[in-house]
Amino acid sequence: MAIELEVVARNDFGRGASRRHRRNEQTPAIIIGQGKEAVTVLLDEKKLIAAALKAEFFEGLTLSLNGEKIAVKPVDIQRHPVSERILHVDFLRV
């Protein structure tokens, strides 16, 4: 079963904006690769955690951004050192 997550484009940047999003249970992420421009997005934190617990998450997944399906693979996941909460994810287009 393929994993598909809904993402929302992000237009505010910086430490303060990222903290606001995390308080609202959203996880900042970036989609890079294939010679295309990087896209910053937000994921629902609870859905991301549920997906990250599955082995298929690390083999590849699909992100849905404004109806466009993007096949990606997580290359870096930043976690809080104490709580292990996911703070940021870097996705690579495949």
Image: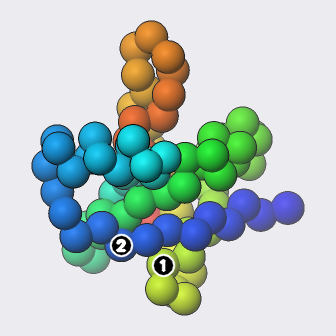
**Residue 20 at x, y percent in the picture:** 29, 47
Q: Residues within 10 Å of mark 2 (few under 14, many from 20)?
A: some
Residue 71 visible: no
The residue at which mark 2 appears reads as: 9
- The answer to whether residue 31 is above or below residue 86 is below
Instruction: Label 2: state its secondary structure.
Output: strand
- The answer to whether residue 2 is above or below residue 14 is below
Amino acid at pointer 2 = Ala
* Near-viewer residue (82 or 55): 82
- The answer to whether residue 43 is above or below residue 75 is below
Q: Label 2 to label 1, Cα distance in Å?
A: 7 Å
Q: Is residue 73 left or right of residue 56?
A: left
Count of marks placed on residues: 2
Q: Residue furthest right?
A: 1
Q: In the image, what residue occupies the spot 30% across and 67% down?
A: 10
**Residue 16 at x, y percent in the picture:** 17, 44
Q: Quadrant of residue 39?
A: bottom left
Task: Please say which color scheme the image uses.
Answer: rainbow
Q: In the image, what residue occupies the spot 19% across and 63% down?
A: 12
* Near-viewer residue (51 or 56): 51
Amino acid at pointer 1 = Leu
Q: Quadrant of residue 50?
A: top right
The residue at which mark 1 appears reads as: 65
Instruction: Label 1: state its secondary structure.
Output: strand
Q: In the image, what residue occupies the spot 50% across and 17% down?
A: 83
